[in-house]
Amino acid sequence: MSDSTRSFPSAGSVGRFVPRSYFGVTFALLFLLTLGGSLRVAQVDPRLLFERESLANLARFVGGMFPPELSWSFLSLMARPVLETIQISVTGTLVAVLIGLPLGLLATGSLTWSGILHEQRPAAGRWLLGFVPYALARALLSVFRSIPEFVWAFMFVRAVGLGPFPGVLAIGVAYGGMLGKVYSEILEGVNSQPLEALHASGAGKLGIALYGLLPQALPNVISYTLYRWECAIRASAILGFVGAGGLGQQVELSMRMFQFNEVVTILGLLFLLVAGVDFVSGRIRARVVR
Amino acid sequence: MKTEVKRAMWPWVASAGFALLIVWSYQGTQVDLAGLLGGEGRRQIATYVAKLFPPDLSAKTLRDAALGAVETFAISFVGSVLAVVIALPLAVLTTRSLLYRGILYEGRRLGPVSKGSRIGVYVIAKAVLNVLRTIPEIVWALIFVLLVGLGPFPGVLALGFHTGGVLGKLFGEVLDDVNPRPIETLHSAGAGRLAILFYGILPQAAPQCLSYALYRWEVNIRAAAVMGFVGAGGLGQRIYIAISLFLDNQLLTLILAIYVMVTVVDVLSAYLRRRFL
């Protein structure tokens, strides 16, 4: 045994010293190059953190945080923005569902143009009434979710004025794009056997959708929508930075006026708010998807 | 019987609760969807969208958009790498199976002082992660602009700190959930805790951690695009100016640049995930 390995060096023992593919090396090189280039472009300079001025600012900042502003007048002043943040997140998610659901249905290939539901349709009709709306819906969803909610919020502030309304629209449009995409993935992923059975027994399109698709897809749809609501509460808390209501506006105000003790309090409130929504949503999600 | 009834009731109770929440929220936010989608609102939206076209494709704007896009990419990339660097050690410190419980400590009783200090380390690391995660990127950005001045660098730090907190929590969950068998084997073969970490835990956790890091990179490219709103570089700064000064055609060019950047990172991340996992 040992003789044969010595006289015939196998491909395996040589292969150990020659990289099996160049992917690893290429990847490492590209990673380092990108990192190096990015460090330059982003003007990363850790020394800046330790300059006397930065340290003085840090001391001022940390010193200003304590004690946190916990006076009753300030806390009662914050009640309204906290509630508004919740309201923006809920209404924003509602709008996102209103946008995401129809577009998501259109963006589901198995519903609009491909697969067993459409086998007997003439090709021209499938193409014009099926594929074209499908492609348009996909494109629209992709634009909606690729533009950050912050940019949407700023544009809507310009369009409809300051306040919670532009925040709702921003979350609605950006999250509508994400919900629509995920809804269509969930719908594509359902087991097609019940659909075929319904189809074979003569069920119409609506019947197939209601009795074949919906029961399979609903738990995941609800669960993902709730997860997005958790994200929306974080988003609605910061959209105020561009004037779209909620806690963000208060953080920005206190920050600009160097009232760091107020900033700490607001961040604490934000923490409680996010934790609360995570808790409620997590409990419900655990029950929906068993 | 009672639990049966409760189980049958809860979807209705939850639905009713949500219906109330939605009505209350809808009224509180003064949303006027009918007005927005009615004749007047629709006309206004159409006018606004029409004003965005055509995108400004002059050489100057294009160069500016390209510079901003590259800067945004750099911020998201370095920010994500920094986040992993921050998250990993903190995640290890929040892995209880390495610190004071689980199979490594089954045969060995820790003294009260030793155990107390280990729990202390765990609690502190958890608290640090919570603080990092709770403060939104944009607030971190404001803080760092205050500390180190304007430019992309505070944007990098902001993404690194916030995402570091998020990834630290996710990494910690992955590290806690690894298969204990290899750990047991290493332990019984006499390996120390560091060896167990490097040979028993990290190899198992690496693919999932990498996947999380790539996912957060996709989130970060979007976040990096708005860091400029508070003076932390990238496309955001230019978008802020374009919106504030009603430079609608330039705005469209910059939005297209965001779209391209986000799509590039999504595709890259999906490719790497397929390649590694």
Image: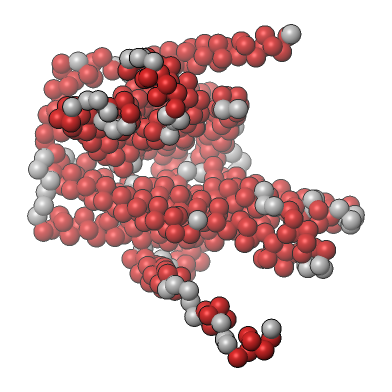
Q: Is residue A87 visible?
A: no
Considering the image in quadrants, where does the N terminus of chain A appear? bottom right
Q: Is residue A147 above or below residue A209?
A: below
Colouring chosen for the image of the structure: secondary structure
Left or right: where does residue A181 sit relative to residue A269?
Answer: left
**How many numbered discs, if any?**
0
Q: Give the image location of residue A5, x and y in percent.
A: 63, 85
Q: Is residue B14 visible?
A: yes
Q: In which image quadrant can residue A91 be found?
A: top left
Query: Left or right: B84 with respect to A203?
Result: right
Q: Say if A8 sits above or below B237 in the image.
A: below
Q: Quadrant of the C terminus of chain A?
A: top right
Between A121 and A223, the one lying in front of the other is A121
Which is more toward the observer, A198 or B19? Answer: A198
Q: Is A98 rendered above or below residue A257?
A: above
Q: Position of residue A163 (x, y in %)?
A: 33, 26
Identify the residue at horizontal 29%, vertical 16% (top origin). B32
Look at 9% across and 55% down and name the residue there.
B58
Q: What percent of the width, then of the height, locates residue B268?
A: 36, 56
Tell me the residue at 72%/68% (across/down): B195
Q: Position of residue B217 (x, y in %)?
A: 43, 53
Residue drawn where x is 21% and y is 41% of the image: B243
Q: Looking at the picture, does residue B231 appear above or below residue A149?
A: below
Closer-to-camera residue (B25/A97): A97
